[in-house]
């Protein structure tokens, strides 16, 4: 029981698997829902007993209301033993060993917050299978065209800490282990880039320049000049270093 609702529970710290908390998902072509699988350590007796009690209350509600007094045998258990097998007969994954396994879903997107700030929704990149959290769930009876049972509704999720991802996708650190190049081993001035057509090598982002500053080449084989200065016309006069007539502006 949680918040005086007999069918509602707040778990202790659990691990999240098969997470679809940011986007709805359909595994069998049915209605897409938000969902996750909750792995409850078998050492957490308090959470386990609370879930079993809430499940029993939901079942009795079904008997008294939806199922009109009948007591159907549940086709599938709601709380699975992670050390056992799935309904298909296959064993649960290694991450389920030593845990009780419950899958909860909802048509409404749950709030996923961090324990340090329960008012702000976490970014999608911070939500993943393998993280640890506390979760609210609510059990309810259902009758779908004669298929009767108890479902587990997903409430909200409070992330408590990070954990090893369970997605099966390798991260960059493991993909590139041993291939890192420390910045200190780079050439002085940064990485080099080679100019096309056999041109000189230069520091990336910098133009190569000869000693004494940059040069610019005149078209049609003209003379080389220092960049930033205008070239005199071909055959033009050399600069005069003598005195200048202050009236005419001509050399004296």
Image (cartoon, rainbow, N blue to C red):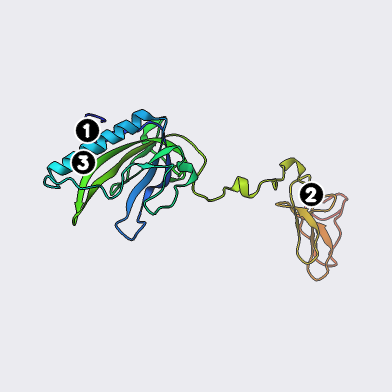
Residue 82 position by quadrant: top left
Q: Mark 1 points at which residue?
A: 6
Q: Can residue 240 be seen in this view?
A: yes
Query: Which residue occupies 22% across, 33% down?
Result: 6
Q: Which of 113 and 31 is in front in this view?
A: 31
Q: Kindly report which numbered mark, 1 or 2, lies closer to the viewer in this rendering.
A: 1
Quadrant of the image occupied by residue 181: top right
Report the disc number at residue 47: none
Q: In this view, does 226 lie above or below 198?
A: above
Q: Find the distance from the CA under tag 1 to the CA under tag 2.
A: 105 Å
Nearest to N terminus: mark 1 or mark 2:
1
Q: Residue 246 carries which label?
A: 2
Residue corresponding to mark 3: 59
Near mark 2 (Cα within 10 A), the count class, few <14, some 14-19 or many ≥20, is: few
- Closer to viewer: mark 2 or mark 3: 3
Q: In this view, does 234 lie to the left or right of 168?
A: right
- x then y, percent, for residue 223: 84, 64
Position in image of residue 128 (x %, y %):
45, 44
Is disc 3 placed on a helix, strand or loop? Answer: helix
Quadrant of the rendering where the N terminus is positioned: top left
């Amino acid at each position: 029981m949680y918040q005086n609702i007999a069918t509602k529970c707040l778990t202790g710290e659990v691990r999240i698997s098969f997470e679809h908390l940011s986007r709805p998902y359909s595994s069998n072509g049915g209605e897409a829902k938000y969902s996750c699988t909750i792995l409850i350590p078998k050492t957490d007796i308090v959470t386990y007993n609370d879930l079993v009690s809430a499940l029993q209350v939901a079942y009795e509600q079904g008997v008294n209301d939806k199922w009109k007094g009948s007591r159907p045998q549940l086709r599938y258990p709601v709380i699975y033993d992670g050390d056992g097998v799935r309904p298909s007969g296959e064993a649960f994954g290694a991450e389920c060993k030593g845990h009780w396994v419950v899958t909860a879903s909802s048509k409404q997107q749950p709030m996923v917050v961090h324990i340090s700030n329960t008012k702000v929704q976490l970014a999608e990149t911070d939500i993943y299978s393998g993280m640890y959290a506390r979760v609210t769930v609510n059990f309810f009876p259902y009758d779908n065209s004669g298929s009767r049972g108890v479902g587990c509704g997903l409430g909200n999720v409070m992330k408590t800490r990070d954990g090893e991802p369970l997605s099966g996708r390798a991260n960059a650190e493991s993909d590139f282990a041993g291939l890192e190049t420390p910045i200190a081993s780079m050439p002085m001035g940064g990485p080099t880039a080679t100019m096309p057509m056999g041109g000189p090598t230069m520091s990336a982002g910098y133009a190569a320049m000869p000693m004494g500053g940059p040069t610019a080449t005149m078209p049609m084989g003209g003379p080389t000049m220092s960049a930033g200065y205008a070239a005199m016309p071909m055959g033009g006069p050399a600069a005069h270093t003598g005195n200048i007539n202050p009236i005419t502006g001509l050399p004296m």
